[in-house]
Amino acid sequence: MANEKNVRLTESELNARYTAAAYKFATVSNWRDYLALAEEFRALDTYKDSAQKYSQCVKAASAPAYRDITDEIRTKGRETTAEEYREAARIMQIIQDYQDAREVMRVYTVRANALTYDAAMAILSNSEATTEELGEGVALLKTIKGFKNTRELIERFEKYYFDRMYNEALRLMEHGHVFSEFEEAAEMFEKISEYSDAAQQAVACRKMANKVRPKEKKKKEKPAEAAAPKGGDEVVRVTRKDAKASKDTPASEGEEVVKPRKRKMIDDETHNSLVEVWRNIDKRRMVEFIIWMLLLLGDLYASIVVPNIQADFFIAHANTIRAITVLLAIFFIVMGCRAFLRMLTASMRKKLGQAAVKFAKKLAAPLIKAVNKLLLSIGIDLSRRNRLGGRDEKTFVFDDTEKVKKTKKKLKNDLKWVDQTDNAARVRFIFIDYMIRRIKKGYFMKRCMTPAEIGSEIALEDDEKALFAVYDKARYAGQRGVEEITDAMVGELQMVNRKRNQ
């Protein structure tokens, strides 16, 4: 009998599933199908020999799955995404008893976490990131909680995200005047319901939204005989007289004839969008906007007609009249724009602002390019200044001594030994650790020096010379360089580092 996990399934259902899975077991040949079948046997748990069948499926899929996945990851290289690494790690976990699949799974998991970490930090460190993007960055960090300093980052950026989301929702709630704005504010509060009094604010927004909810007109119910099927053709009763007048075959008395319905050629999506805009805009502000535009048109008409009037008063004060009409036109334009913006909802104003900024950047791009070209011709390179973060280049040339004295105590090797996947990376880790400790003991390293120059400057013993020689080999090592660096060489360098750092 089945155990407690399968207690809801009857014996016949379990037998049917087992029979189907056993039939597939005799026919599958692809390792992916084997793994899918293994999940089916795993769901059956201890029913008959399901556990043994599960082990057989995993064993049959292990070798080809390991080979295909490692080859695919190696071929893609740096183009491999975090999702692909995670999927590869998941499969390696299933076949973890095959060769070094457990170690490969750990490496792929670390790489996936590192890519996710970099993607999250790219979002969170962007000063122009929107509130929604900040939320996505925090969500990415939560998927790799425990990796590096993610716990500290989550605590810091989540509070910043909550504050920003709360303030935006509160601003929308206080300045909102239509149903959609209150609904949007409520949804924003609900996203951060655990923060402060966001849950209570969401309830208040829902109540305010219900007060201004647009009333839907009730449709009158048509009689059953007159009603036509929705979305279909219209059914009409045709008498004998109507049938004789028709070009089609005459219908008998009381016979129903299908008459095609005339469909409106309107895009439903566009129509609904226009209806939504019309429903949400402030009608009072819209009337105010129209009035200001009419006054502007009247002013423009007066500026054309009045100067042409052949009267002594108008001829004598023509310049004054022109100045007044110009001032009035500017006033009407300003008030009209103000009414237009207040007529729109907050989300509409936001979209309009984004479109205006994008359009302005597109117009200013040729001018900026011409200015940069002009400055470059006289020796001013703004792009280089931006890359240096606005700092003078002398900080890289003259201030090394003071900078090292201030930062010497803060030096730390951010790399971790467990994250180094090959011997070349391990050698680089050992070299960095060795140089940090030498600097802390008083050695002054110039940034322009190469490892060979550093090695010739320090009083080296034979074993330390070996460290610099192997590091020079591992510095730009590819696959071939990794093979030249053996595990024994890495072990000797570790011993050298530990001895010199005591």
Image: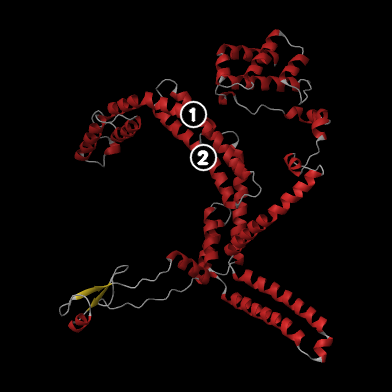
Q: Is residue 421 left or right of residue 68?
A: right
Amino acid type for the residue under numbered disc 2: Thr
Q: Nearer the viewer, residue 18 or 20?
A: 20
Residue highlighted by disc 2: 143
Residue under the point 45% across and 24% down: 102
Q: Quadrant of residue 346?
A: bottom right
Q: Is residue 146 visible?
A: no
The residue at which mark 1 appears reads as 75
Q: In the depicted view, which residue is nearer to us: 351 or 105?
A: 351
Residue 215 at x, y = what percent?
46, 74
Q: Is residue 279 above or below residue 72?
A: below
Tell me which amino acid carries mark 1.
Answer: Thr
Q: CA distance from mark 1 to mark 2?
A: 27 Å
Q: Are marks 1 and 2 in contact (CB under 8 Å)?
A: no
Which residue is at 57% across, 49% downward? Answer: 133
Where 125 sits versus 482, above or below? below
Query: The N terminus appears in which quarter of the rendering?
Result: top left
Q: Secondary structure at mark 1?
A: helix
Across and down, in percent, residue 479 comes to 55, 21
